[in-house]
Image (cartoon, helix red, strand yellow):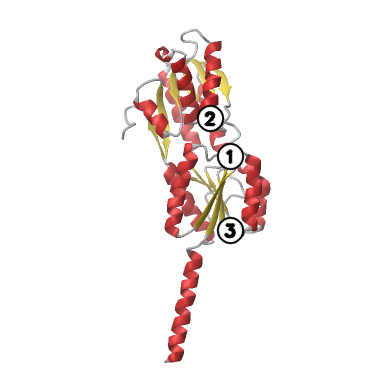
Amino acid sequence: MMFFAGTIARGLAALLVLTGVAMAQNVTVVTPYLAQPGTQMYLEGFEAEAAGKGWNVNVIDTAGDVAAVISRIEDAVTQKVDAIVINVDPAQVAAGLEAAAAASIPVIGMDSGADPLVVTNVTSNGYAMAAETSVYVANRIEGKGRIVMFVFDAFPPVQIRGVIADAVFGNYPDIEVIDRITPDVQDGGIADSRAKMEALLAANPEKGSISAVWAAWDQPALGALQAIEDAGRADEGIVIVGIDANPQARDAIAAGGNFEASIAQDFIGIGKATADAVARAISGEEIRERVTYVPTVLVTKSNVNN
């Protein structure tokens, strides 16, 4: 009896150890964009899901320093983590991704970009979001007028939005893109977008000289809104749209002013779906879809409070 009792006890102990290992996966998340509200919400969803799985999550913010992401990934490889999540252009951190691949550590993108060294990139459909918001602008100004675009080509999920908006506006012979602005995003993008919009308003002082502002994400749209209001030009009917539908953008849309529309990404859902992808990768499952899309919704004054 003592033998069987000991065997059972050892079996239970082994099971607990194995369970402990499964519940203590170590995952490192690296991003240079933690100042962005969207990234903060991704992490909220990811960490909530990770907590339910018993993971140890280490979030590293390089504060706008993309190059530093490589060494932080390499640090995670040295620490032998179970998985790495990135929120940065994979093409800019190739050396880090190669180090992770050499160590057989899966890397999952959380609104980053597709890459052969990234298991899957969990994101919203940037092509669809850009098409919907740019068509909204074109329809609102009845297919003619002068448009300002705020873009950020250094980050693939945002870069593709600009490409699609360019194509939509280019399909209207009476629409002219008068400037394609890339703001400084160190503080999120509002302050520099406001300053650049102020300069553009000063250079185009005539009423009607600017018909609309299309922004690839909400912060530049908010900065442009502030500049337009401070310049006393809010009554000119300049249409502003963004993408993300963050809380500040929703408030601006609800106010019924120039900021008319944005796209609500399911940031929490992206974070949760990223955690699901991490779990699948850690388990050894082959994930065939290189990009995993999470649905979005156009937000206007009619549904902003829904």
Judged by depth in the image, the label closer to the viewer, 2 or 1, is 1
Rendering coords of residue 160 (x, y %): 55, 34
Residue 166 is at least partly visible in this image: no
Please give the residue where the numbered disc 3 appears in the rendered image. Answer: 81
Please give the residue where the numbered disc 2 appears in the rendered image. Answer: 189
Q: Residue at x 57, y 19 (%)?
A: 179
Q: Residue at x 44, y 30 (%)?
A: 132
Give the number of marks. 3
Residue 170's disc number: none
Rendering coords of residue 150 (x, y %): 53, 25
Query: Outermost residue toward the right?
Result: 95
**What kind of element bears circle 3?**
loop
Judged by depth in the image, the label closer to the viewer, 1 or 3, is 1
Within 10 Å of disc 2 (Cα), the crowding (few <14, some 14-19, many 20+) is many
**The C terminus is located in which quarter?**
top left
Q: Determine the CA span between mark 3 and mark 2.
A: 33 Å
In this rendering, the answer to whether 88 lies above or below 119 is above
Question: Which callout, 2 or 1, points at the residue further toward the start of the chain?
Answer: 1
Question: Which callout, 3 or 2, points at the residue further toward the start of the chain?
Answer: 3
**Between 152 and 192, which is closer to the camera in this rendering?**
192
Please give the residue where the numbered disc 1 appears in the rendered image. Answer: 63
**Between 188 and 179, which is closer to the camera in this rendering?**
188
In this rendering, the answer to whether 159 lies above or below 103 is above
Amino acid under label 2?
Gly
